[in-house]
Image (cartoon, rainbow, N blue to C red):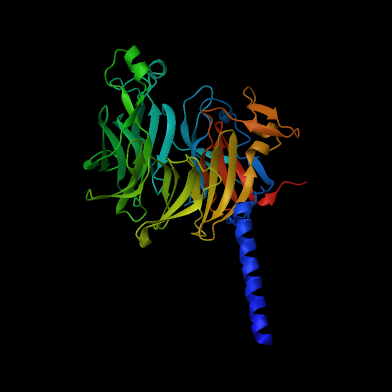
């Protein structure tokens, strides 16, 4: 009898509990909804080191004017700096500079208005891009005036440093890249106003071979100047680039209107590696196994820094999707295949990073926007715009066309060099600014 009464009590309690639950469900339905607990993700901000920055060339006056230091690079054979420079009274020449002694050697005669120099792998030759400024070159009676090319467009020249010999190539060439052996060049050629092809040739332009018609389109370039001069042959600029693999068997290209990042074999076979509208800044690792590039996602306009492994069927890895590496400029370490030094071209400034690609570790080297030495970035008659933030710290407000270019390492990888406002600077990676 007692056991029966206990069972009745248990059933009654269960009935009461269920009844209360049903009543609560209808009276307070929110109590029974699944609650999503939001955990705020706090991302660690990158702190930048206070590294020492120096002007590399301090005892010359040519860097102060329009033909400042251009296309600088270290000659790995003698560890001297190669570059072009002119001054107020003469057009640019090629020089070699011993950094420690500041002794420079003149290696060439004067050129025209040099835009850039694309050095061969052995530094014995160069492809030189010059601006075809007809009036100025005419006044100088320069041999680098190309009369049948539109005013202001780029003309390309082959230069042999051993005999000071220059050969004119063409004005419809763009985006030149040397083969790893230095015996060939690859370039994009404008067949007509919106038709581009990929060619290879000997560096002097001989034995040109068409590889493939490119997928993409150009951007009108110097059209207004051409129309003003009643010329029909104005240039459509290929808004992209190309790079020859260090292994010598493949070339990558990218550009406006192309499907993305494309791999082309020397036999003309092509493969789309990355389907995206905006790929930029692609470059091979020194061993030819990796490709580093930036890509803008169309869905949210976010720019990411990505990596592809050629030995793993070009599988993509995202290196960073937060720092906005828009058109990054990076240089690979030759001592550590997993390390690159990168410049992020932000809207109002420039930041340098050291990135371990395997570990995805990003170290902030220096933030030029917050660099406090105004004198370092000024020159005699042209000072950069300098403003103060709320903490009264100075930062650099660069002009739209004054981008940092030509970042590169010294052979010992103790300094990271960059060109800004026609002046060459070096970041000492081993030495911090004294507090």
Image location of residue 322, percent across then percent down: 55, 46
Residue at x 43%, y 31% (from the top left corner): 115
The residue nearer to you, when weighing 166 against 71, is 71
The residue nearer to you, when weighing 122 against 390, is 390
Q: Is residue 306 left or right of residue 64?
A: left
Image location of residue 427, percent across then percent down: 62, 45
The residue nearer to you, when weighing 2 against 145, is 2
Q: Is residue 369 visible?
A: yes
Quarter of the rendering occupied by the N terminus: bottom right
Q: Is residue 134 above or below residue 213?
A: above
Q: Is residue 41 visible?
A: no
Image location of residue 122, percent across then percent down: 40, 49
Residue that protrudes farthest toward the front in the picture: 1
Q: Is residue 169 left or right of residue 67?
A: left
Q: Is residue 173 left or right of residue 11?
A: left
Q: Is residue 314 above or below residue 156?
A: below
Image location of residue 235, percent across then percent down: 32, 25
Q: Quadrant of residue 412?
A: bottom right
């Amino acid at each position: 009898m007692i056991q029966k009464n206990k069972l009745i009590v248990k059933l009654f309690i269960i009935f009461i509990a269920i009844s209360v639950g049903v009543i609560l469900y209808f009276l307070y339905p929110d109590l029974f909804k699944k609650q999503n607990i939001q955990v705020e993700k706090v991302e660690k901000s990158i702190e930048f080191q206070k590294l020492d920055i120096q002007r590399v060339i301090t005892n010359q006056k040519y860097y102060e004017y329009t033909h400042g230091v251009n296309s600088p690079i270290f000659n790995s054979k003698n560890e001297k700096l190669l570059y072009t420079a002119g001054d107020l009274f003469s057009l640019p020449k090629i020089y070699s500079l011993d950094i420690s002694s500041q002794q420079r050697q003149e290696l060439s005669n004067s050129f025209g208005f040099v835009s850039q120099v694309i050095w061969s792998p052995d530094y014995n030759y160069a492809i030189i891009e010059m601006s075809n400024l007809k009036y100025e070159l005419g006044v100088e009676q320069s041999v680098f005036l190309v009369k049948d090319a539109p005013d202001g467009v780029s003309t390309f020249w082959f230069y042999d440093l051993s005999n000071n010999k220059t050969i004119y190539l063409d004005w419809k060439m763009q985006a030149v890249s040397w083969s790893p052996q230095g015996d060939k060049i690859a370039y994009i050629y404008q067949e007509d106003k919106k038709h581009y092809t990929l060619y290879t040739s000997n560096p002097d332009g001989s034995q040109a071979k068409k590889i493939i018609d490119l997928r993409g389109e150009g951007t009108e370039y110097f059209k207004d100047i051409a129309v003003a001069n009643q010329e029909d042959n104005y240039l459509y600029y290929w808004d992209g680039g190309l790079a020859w693999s260090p292994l010598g068997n493949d070339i990558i290209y990218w550009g406006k209107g192309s499907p993305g990042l494309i791999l082309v074999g020397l036999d003309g076979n092509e493969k789309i590696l990355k389907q995206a509208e905006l790929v930029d800044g692609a470059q091979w690792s020194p061993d030819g196994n990796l490709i580093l590039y930036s890509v803008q996602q169309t869905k949210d306009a976010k720019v990411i820094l990505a990596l592809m492994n050629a030995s793993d069927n070009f599988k993509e890895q995202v290196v960073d999707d937060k720092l906005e590496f828009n058109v990054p400029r990076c240089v690979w370490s030759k001592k550590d295949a997993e390390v690159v030094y990168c410049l992020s071209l932000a809207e109002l400034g420039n930041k340098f990073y050291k990135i371990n690609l395997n570990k995805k570790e990003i170290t902030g080297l220096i933030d030029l926007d917050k660099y406090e030495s105004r004198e370092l970035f000024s020159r005699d008659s042209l000072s950069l715009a300098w403003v103060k933030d709320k903490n009264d710290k100075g930062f650099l407000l660069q002009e739209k066309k004054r981008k940092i270019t030509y970042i590169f390492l010294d052979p010992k990888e103790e300094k990271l060099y960059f060109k800004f406002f026609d002046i060459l600077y070096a970041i000492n990676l081993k030495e911090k600014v004294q507090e």
